[in-house]
Amino acid sequence: MKLVAGVDLGGTAVNYTLLTGAEKFLIEGLFEHPARSKEGPAVCMKQIADGLELAVARAGANLDDIVVVGLDTPGPASAQGVLSLRGATNFAHAEWAGFDMKSGLSGRLGKPVTYLNDGNAAALWGHFNLFGTRTDVVSVSAIVGTGLGGGVIVKGTDIKGRSGFGGELGHVLIPYRGLAALDGVTPRCNCGRTGDLEALCSLTAITNTLLPHMLPKYPGHELAGMDIGAAAKRVRGMAEAGDAMCREIFQVQAHALGLFFDIMINTFDPDALIVGGGAIETGPEFQTWFVEEIRRGMPDQREEQAGIPIHIMPHGDTAGARGAAIEALRHARTAGLMAGA
């Protein structure tokens, strides 16, 4: 049996999946292993290898069955998986600066490795889930988590760009001054920009901007007086439960996404828009409400484009690993490594 592996490396955990040549996933749910990324590349690479061995055993396979490993990580990184000289999101150890993720993992495993940033990987999975191997369709995905990642898939391939920063959708500037609920707010992103999508639509945006702005409007709210970071992590659950302030925060985020998607519609005229990430790892009722609010936040569309569907990312917690595995499978087929699979 010939397989490819998908490895989604985060700051604290690694998520794995395995994919056959017939495009069947052998691990359906979330399979995680601690990342220990704060201890630097050497420790983390070993953690990835150890976790992969456990994942293969879980699927009843052998490490020798894996012909290519697909890796995704947070950026910024080049298209070849070399992290920025300033380091990368969630990787604070000094030795991560300029680290070659692709070569580092390939050397540890003794196997070919492909690389995507985590937003592109999730976008690839969302596109594949909707359209399979079709190459005549375009999708745009926004992944809302601690930050905001995403990707644009054209002809079945994610747009990486000249330096690998294609699909950094969180840093697209949006006309936020049109959002009435943000009167007087200057949303700044950790990247240094003002008014990009991540500055309004992410957990970091809730912590730094939206929650501090909204709390004075709701005197006596139970989140007032709490540590702001801890309070921000409760906003999603309280919004789903119907709390008025937390709903307003998520309404702002949905309307910001609406403005962003309008830009994408006028740039790519896509076949589908996809929303994923921890922000909407909720029940169907809240997801439906959130998508409706995205629509309300979109300026009037041309009649021909008004029906572009907005989908919720399927298998959201495993989307990155699945997308990384799809990229690995493509490489394996091109290189002739899946012959006879």
Image (cartoon, rainbow, N blue to C red):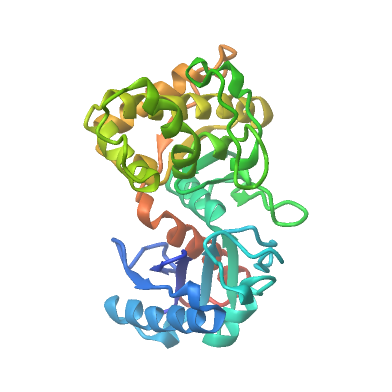
Left or right for 107, reference 318 = right
Name the foreground residue: 53 vs 337. 53
Q: Give how far across and how far down residue 50 sits, in percent.
A: 40, 84
Instruction: Using the rendered view, name the quadrant where residue 248 is placed.
Output: top left
Q: Residue at x 56, y 12 (%)?
A: 300
Q: Quadrant of residue 116?
A: bottom right
Where, quadrant-wise, is the C terminus in this rendering? bottom left
Q: Residue at x 35, y 79 (%)?
A: 56
Residue at the outermost left position: 241
43 over 300 or under it: above or below: below
- Residue 223 in which image quadrant: top left
How far across and down, in percent of the image, does residue 176 sit? 59, 24
Q: Is residue 252 visible?
A: yes
Residue 24 place in picture, x, y as percent: 37, 63
Q: Is residue 328 left or right of residue 279?
A: right
Q: Residue drawn at (37%, 28%), measured in percent from left and top?
A: 215
* Residue 291 is at least partly visible in this image: no
Residue under the image location 67 percent in, 39 percent down = 193
